[in-house]
């Protein structure tokens, strides 16, 4: 960045700055998703201290991302950048924020409600989380492509849809297993499993919602 | 030049004003409408480069127009220009597509009929021919340019934010080219009919001779600048928001291809060069900027696969070819009759 400031004009460094900020914002989304995967893993392993540490990290990343988003928004408007597409870009950043919100809520609720996940569901919960995280990571790739390699957006979006569908399948499997199970005797606990399966799956749903928007923005941006 | 002389130039000034208000707005419409470029910047660039284009390269197209009929009395020039201006005004008010070029050609033919001068058929064919291949050429150039731009953008993978900066620079450069070409080609519509009866004499300023014709073109340029300053903003905002909604990058393609069409029909240097290379050259005559632009938009539509083609635009062009010159010719003939017989002014030699 310093190199650019030296060689480029005032505008160059501003453009570069906002590009870096956006890249950092997308990294926060990636990190949030990856941390969630780690947190759930620790929870399923019963390592509650490590889990709580990850939950705190997600919380802090979510806040940092919020601040950064506001800063980017301010810059785009104050410095009159991309007047033609800044509405779309802001919409994108705001809906991306929902993904991080979901990650934060999942860990918060795991922390508060400490659901008892029976052994036969642990692998499914882990697989569900991993699949949802894949959807998020693919989404941020699509978002990055939107800014740089527009023609690549679709291939990433297709994968987001694929992982979202996979997540739905696993979510249903978890629910069916929970409700058919004789091991979980209390109905309330079966409902609890369903609730958490749905909560985690929301991560993929939100990713798909952003993907839908992105598809439209990409068509608008194509010359 | 007396007061009467000045008065007779007023219709030309109005034509210049209209060029600045409408045609100049076509160039920067998307840029200003989408707030990529400030109106002030756009206004300054278009006023300056239209005037430069007119003074430096405006003579070629004016000669082409002059070949159609040399209006040789100032009162006649006034009527011809006023008839064209009124036609443009009427048709714009009625929401019909109109081209200044076609109006002035019709008005000159009206003068020819009134004064008994034979209309040079070859010149007329040449000019009317450009109406047809102007838009077609625009479509062809835009079609090719679109693929070139698309290819470059895909190869370079420029970040959206950086692209924003490049787009602004490209809009300014395209605007400069567009304004220069507009001045070079279309100023003939504004001052062309005054050339044979120009009231200006050659001036010596600091050892440089400024010919009467150049003064005439400069005056046209100034009238255009007034049109840009007073009215074009409104037109620009309309273009940017409603009529032809183009993305800034597509707008660049349209501006450049339109400017190329106008330039091909205006540049004496280019004509000589093409002839020396044994290439087919273009007659130097005024062509319609808006129709070249519509042609370019259609070219892009075709490049995109032809799904969003608006064939109404094509119909409007063809309608303009017939309606505009006919009305201007009739109006010009009637007005010349009144000018000669009621106001007792000499409208032809």
Image (cartoon, rainbow, N blue to C red):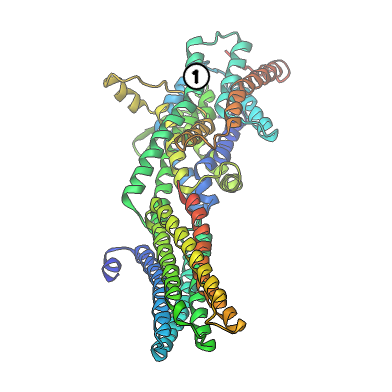
Give x and y (percent) for residue A60: 44, 83
Q: Name the residue under label 1.
A: B127
Residue sitting at the far front: A182
SS of the residue under disc 1: helix
Residue at mark 1: chain = B
At label 1, counting other C-alpha atoms closer than 10 Å, the crowd grade (few under 14, some 14-19, many 20 or more) is: many
Residue sitting at the far bottom: A49
Whether B321 is drawn above or below A118: the answer is above
Give x and y (percent) for residue A160: 45, 60
Q: In which quarter of the image is the C terminus of chain B?
A: top right
Whether residue B95 appears in this view of the structure is: yes
Counting labels gives 1
Residue A55 appears in which quarter of the rendering?
Answer: bottom left
Q: Quadrant of the N terminus of chain B?
A: top right
Which residue is painted at 35% across and 63% down in the image? A12
Which residue is painted at 42% across and 70% down in the image? A133
Q: Is residue B262 left or right of residue B69?
A: left
Residue sitting at the far right: B342
Whether residue A94 appears in this view of the structure is: no
| Residue in front for this viewpoint, B139 or B121 | B139
Give x and y (percent) for residue A4: 29, 66
| Residue in front for this viewpoint, B280 or B207 | B280
Residue B118 appears in which quarter of the rendering?
Answer: top right
Which residue is painted at 34% across and 53% down in the image? B157
Give x and y (percent) for residue B234: 61, 47
């Amino acid at each position: 960045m310093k190199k650019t400031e030296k060689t480029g004009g005032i505008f160059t460094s501003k453009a570069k700055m906002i590009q870096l900020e956006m890249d950092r914002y997308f990294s926060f989304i990636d990190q949030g998703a990856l941390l969630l995967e780690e947190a759930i893993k620790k929870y399923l392993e019963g390592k509650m201290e490590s889990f709580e540490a990850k939950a705190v990290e997600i919380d802090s990343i979510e806040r940092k991302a919020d601040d950064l988003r506001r800063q980017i928004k301010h810059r785009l408007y104050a410095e009159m950048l991309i007047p033609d597409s800044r509405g779309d870009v802001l919409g994108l950043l705001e809906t991306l924020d929902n993904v991080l919100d979901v990650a934060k809520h999942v860990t918060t609720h795991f922390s508060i409600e400490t659901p008892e996940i029976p052994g036969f569901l642990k692998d499914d919960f882990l697989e569900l989380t991993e699949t949802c995280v894949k959807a998020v990571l693919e989404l941020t790739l699509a978002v990055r492509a939107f800014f740089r390699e527009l023609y690549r957006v679709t291939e990433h979006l297709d994968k987001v849809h694929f992982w979202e569908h996979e997540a739905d399948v696993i979510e249903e499997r978890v629910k069916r297993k929970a409700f058919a199970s004789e091991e979980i005797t209390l109905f309330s606990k079966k409902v609890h499993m369903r609730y958490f399966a749905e909560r985690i799956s929301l991560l993929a749903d939100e990713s798909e919602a952003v993907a839908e928007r992105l598809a439209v923005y990409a068509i608008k941006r194509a010359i | 030049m007396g007061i009467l002389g000045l008065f007779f130039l007023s219709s030309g000034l109005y034509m210049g004003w209209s060029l600045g208000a409408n045609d100049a707005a076509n160039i920067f419409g998307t840029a200003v409408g989408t707030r990529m470029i400030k109106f002030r910047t756009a206004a300054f660039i278009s006023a300056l480069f239209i005037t430069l284009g007119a003074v430096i390269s405006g003579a070629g197209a004016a000669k082409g127009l002059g070949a159609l009929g040399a209006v040789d009395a100032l009162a006649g020039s006034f009527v011809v220009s006023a008839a064209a201006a009124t036609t443009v005004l009427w048709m714009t008010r009625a929401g019909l597509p109109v081209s200044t070029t076609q109006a002035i050609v019709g008005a000159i033919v009206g003068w020819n009929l009134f004064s008994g001068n034979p209309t040079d058929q070859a010149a007329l064919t040449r000019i009317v021919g450009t109406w047809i291949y102007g838009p077609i050429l625009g479509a062809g150039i835009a079609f090719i340019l679109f693929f070139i731009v698309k290819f470059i953008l895909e190869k370079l993978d420029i970040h959206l934010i950086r692209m924003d900066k490049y787009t602004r620079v490209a809009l300014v450069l395209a605007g400069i080219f567009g304004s220069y070409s507009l001045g070079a080609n279309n100023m003939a519509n504004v001052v062309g009919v005054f050339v044979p009866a120009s009231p200006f004499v050659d001036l010596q300023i600091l050892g440089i001779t400024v010919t009467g014709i150049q003064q005439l073109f400069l005056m046209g340029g100034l009238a255009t600048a007034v049109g840009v300053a007073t009215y074009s903003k409104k037109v620009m905002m309309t273009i940017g928001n409603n009529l032809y909604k183009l993305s800034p990058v597509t707008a660049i393609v349209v501006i450049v291809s339109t400017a190329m069409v106008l330039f091909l029909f205006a540049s004496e240097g280019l004509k000589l060069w093409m002839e020396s290379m044994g290439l087919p050259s273009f007659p130097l005559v005024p062509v319609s900027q808006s129709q070249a632009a519509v042609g370019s938009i259609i070219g892009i539509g075709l490049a995109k696969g032809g799904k969003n083609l608006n064939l109404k635009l094509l119909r409007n062009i063809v309608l303009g070819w017939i309606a505009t010159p006919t009305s201007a010719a009739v109006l010009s003939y009637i007005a010349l009759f009144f000018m000669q017989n009621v106001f007792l002014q000499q409208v032809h030699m």
